[in-house]
Image (spheres, rainbow, N blue to C red):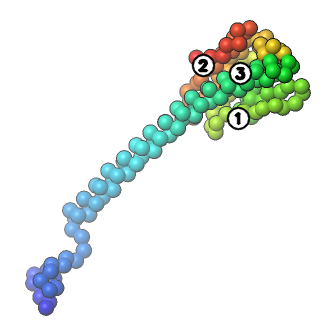
């Protein structure tokens, strides 16, 4: 049974309305705005967390790379050199005129300063460095990270 009364439609005693009211539309727009705000905040937070994790990993990887180069020279009783390529944003370890290992900085990280002679750190057959060196790189957020290498003590640290 179907009745029509004052622009309201009833089918089998059920009320059926046509279209949306202004209040319903505003309510849906408000919910979508709140949800998109939370999503935008979370994306920014995720980018910050990713940058922090990548910069910590990069610090540890550079230190590990240098220490592995020293260990390689000690065990093989040979000299080597670690070359910091500012153009390629990478570190290359050479021993006996061969490339032994290479490390690339994470995406959008850049070396900004290396104060080693000709951009390389020399390692003798005992695994000791003859030069002090400071390496500075910039992360995605523009923060600078400094790693120093001490002479003779074989100590590498993050500042």
Q: Point out the residue furthest to the front here.
A: 75
Residue tagged 1:
104
Task: Identify the mark nearer the N-term, 1 or 2.
Answer: 1
Per the rendering, the mark at residue 56 is none
Which element carries disc 3, helix, strand or loop?
helix
For the point 75% across and 17% down, the residue is 116
Which element carries disc 1, helix, strand or loop?
strand
Which element carries disc 2, helix, strand or loop?
strand
* Residue 94 picture location, percent across and down: 83, 27
Residue tagged 3:
67
* Residue 84 picture location, percent across and down: 75, 26
For the point 42% across and 44% down, the residue is 42
* Residue 91 picture location, percent across and down: 74, 29
- Disc 1: CA contacts within 10 A as few (<14), some (14-19) or many (>=20): some
Relative placement, left or right, of 44 versus 14 is: right
Q: Return the residue nearer the eye: 108 or 60.
A: 60
- 1 and 3 marks in contact (CB < 8 Å): no
Is 112 drawn above or below residue 149 in the view shown?
Answer: below
Task: Identify the mark nearer the N-term, 1 or 3.
Answer: 3
Q: Point out the residue furthest to the top here.
A: 152
- 2 and 3 marks in contact (CB < 8 Å): no
- 1 and 2 marks in contact (CB < 8 Å): no
- Report, in whole angstroms, how far the alpha carbon at label 1 lies from the one at label 2: 18 Å
Is 80 drawn above or below residue 37 in the view shown?
Answer: above
- Report, in whole angstroms, how far the alpha carbon at label 1 lies from the one at label 3: 16 Å
Task: Identify the mark nearer the N-term, 2 or 3.
Answer: 3
Relative placement, left or right, of 64 versus 93 is: left
The image quadrant that residue 22 belongs to is: bottom left
Location of the N terminus by quadrant is bottom left
Residue tagged 2:
158
The image quadrant that residue 5 belongs to is: bottom left
- Report, in whole angstroms, how far the alpha carbon at label 2 lies from the one at label 3: 13 Å
């Amino acid at each position: 049974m179907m009745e029509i009364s004052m622009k309201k439609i009833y089918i089998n005693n059920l009320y059926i309305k046509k279209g949306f009211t202004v209040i319903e539309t505003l309510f849906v727009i408000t919910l979508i705005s709140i949800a998109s705000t939370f999503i935008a905040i979370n994306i920014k937070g995720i980018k910050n967390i990713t940058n922090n994790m990548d910069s910590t990993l990069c610090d540890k990887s550079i230190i590990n790379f240098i220490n592995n180069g020293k260990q390689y020279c000690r065990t093989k009783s040979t000299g080597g050199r670690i070359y910091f390529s500012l153009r390629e944003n990478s570190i290359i370890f050479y021993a006996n005129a061969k490339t032994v290992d290479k490390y690339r900085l994470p995406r959008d990280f850049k070396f900004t300063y290396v104060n080693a002679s000709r951009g390389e750190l020399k390692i003798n057959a005992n695994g000791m460095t003859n030069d002090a060196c400071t390496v500075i790189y910039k992360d995605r957020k523009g923060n600078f990270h400094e790693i120093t290498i001490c002479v003779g003590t074989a100590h590498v640290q993050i500042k």
